Image: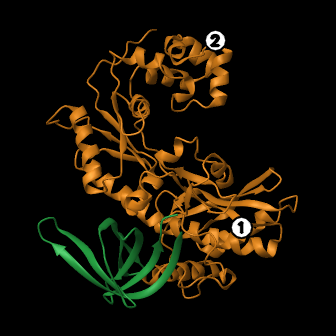
Chain colours: A green, B orange
Amino acid sequence: MTTQINEQVSVSLAYDANNGKAFPYIMKRKNEVIKFEKLGFHHKVYEGKDLIHYFHLIANGTFFKLRLDTNTLSWRLIEIASPA
Amino acid sequence: MTLPVNQEQPKVMHIDLNSCFASIEQQANPLLRDKPIAVAAYDSPNGCILAPSIEAKRFGIKTGMRVKDAKNLYKGLIVLTPDPPKYRIVQRRFLEIFKSYSPTVSAKSIDEAVIDFHGVKLKKDISEIGIEIKQRIREEIGEWISSNVGISTNRFLAKLAASLHKPDGLDVITHENLIETYKNVGLRDLHGINFRYEARLNSFGIFTPLDFFNAPLTLLKKRVFKGISGYYWYLRLRGWEIDSIDFKRRSFGQSYALKYKTADSKKLYPLLLKLCEKMARRIRKNNLTARGVHVACSYTDGTYWHKGEMSSNALYSTFEFYEKAKEILEKSPQRKSVAKLAVSAYGLVPRTPVQQTLFESKTTKLRILSKALDKVNDMFGEYTIAPATMLGLKSEIIDRIAFGK
């Protein structure tokens, strides 16, 4: 079941110089700390002039879609999906 | 006249992504992997399935089915709505991979492309390059993205080769295995042969691809296709390239399957306007104008109406296209409930700069305004500024995969 959300969250992003990839490894949402297990897909799009990064991740059997606005460096949780 | 089969080394590669949209969704959300899922235009019961996953296809679920019919085949089907930005990014990435092998790459659709290796010095066997490309797609785009590769001497046979072993196959058709390949496929497996062409071929005693291959040139040219097409088929079937021309775009169009069917023109005109805005933006982005507008309606009773008209002036602004499209729509003879609305512009002509004068005409003002609005929407996002008639339509006619934007 997919739920659309638009909630500001705190995220820690790690960058690995060996493979040149960035991975959001922890998210703090309300009082919950979620450690991400796997990055499924990452892509970026221009919304107007703003460069936005989208990360598709899973943790604890739940799917999360995160949005990073490079203009404000703020993170938003925009989608959660739990298994059917 | 008889022509032999092309015996040169195969240098044309056709690649297509397996169950493209569904595989990309499974790549993004690993929890969906190995599950029957489908991407549908709408996730409601009458939504049209755009792409079933490989797992869903095993239950007989096909593109074009309604969601409710697909769920009758597999009750637990997970249905998602499309996310076009992801699909476009994937297309961009795979084209970048292909262009690293040859400058001659043609994107045939959002999930298919052809690489022509003529004139390229190959450092390894072309089949090894095919394997390498499949591997790079998995490594550089996503480990769940699989593809079919077909290799041959022309685009037609390369595409046929790519269809032979799905998913995740790699096949080569050469003069050595061509006849054997034709023995194992049907007429409608050949790209370009639909059920109408099949019936036509059948009427001339051609029932299989092998019959088609063995048919004399004079029969194909003078009787079956009654023209040069017959000669082209004769060449194509023998592995000679005649499809390498990429045709210039002749029209731009937008269509919308209405969520709430209606015959009410007050509800149809804003939708028509939004379709014209999307279409006109694409035309302006390509620095073109158009002289023709075509409007089509598919009705809920299964009937269809369409009309196209040329304008005396070259059309450029959204308002100009909308006025013309509305004028055409008003000519529809019946007021029936519309299921799908489409508008397209044809007669494309490069935009010529307009000489500015002290006293600008309405047309010139509209063009200048259109360019300014495009700049605002490019900078701040689509529909930051939009006609007031489109208020409340944000969730209607959302982004779909037109080929490019």
Identity, as a three-letter code, of the amino acid under mark 2? Gly
Q: Percent position (x, y) of residue B23? A: 42, 53
Please tell me which of labels 2 and 1 falls first in the chain.
2
Q: Nearer the viewer, residue B5 or A15?
A: A15
Q: Nearer the viewer, residue B23 or B89?
A: B23
Name the side, left or right, on which B384 lies relative to A59.
right
Identity, as a three-letter code, of the amino acid under mark 1? Lys
Q: Which residue is mark 1?
A: B324
Task: Give me the residue at 83% from left, 71% from top.
Answer: B264
Q: Percent position (x, y) of residue B99? A: 27, 49
Q: Which residue is mark 2?
A: B205
Nearer to us of marks 2 and 1 is 2
Task: Give me the residue at 51% from left, 69% from top.
Answer: B284
Chain ID, mark 1:
B
Name the side, left or right, on which B298 lies relative to B48.
right
Task: Give me the residue at 80% from left, 50% from top.
Answer: B302
Chain ID, mark 2:
B
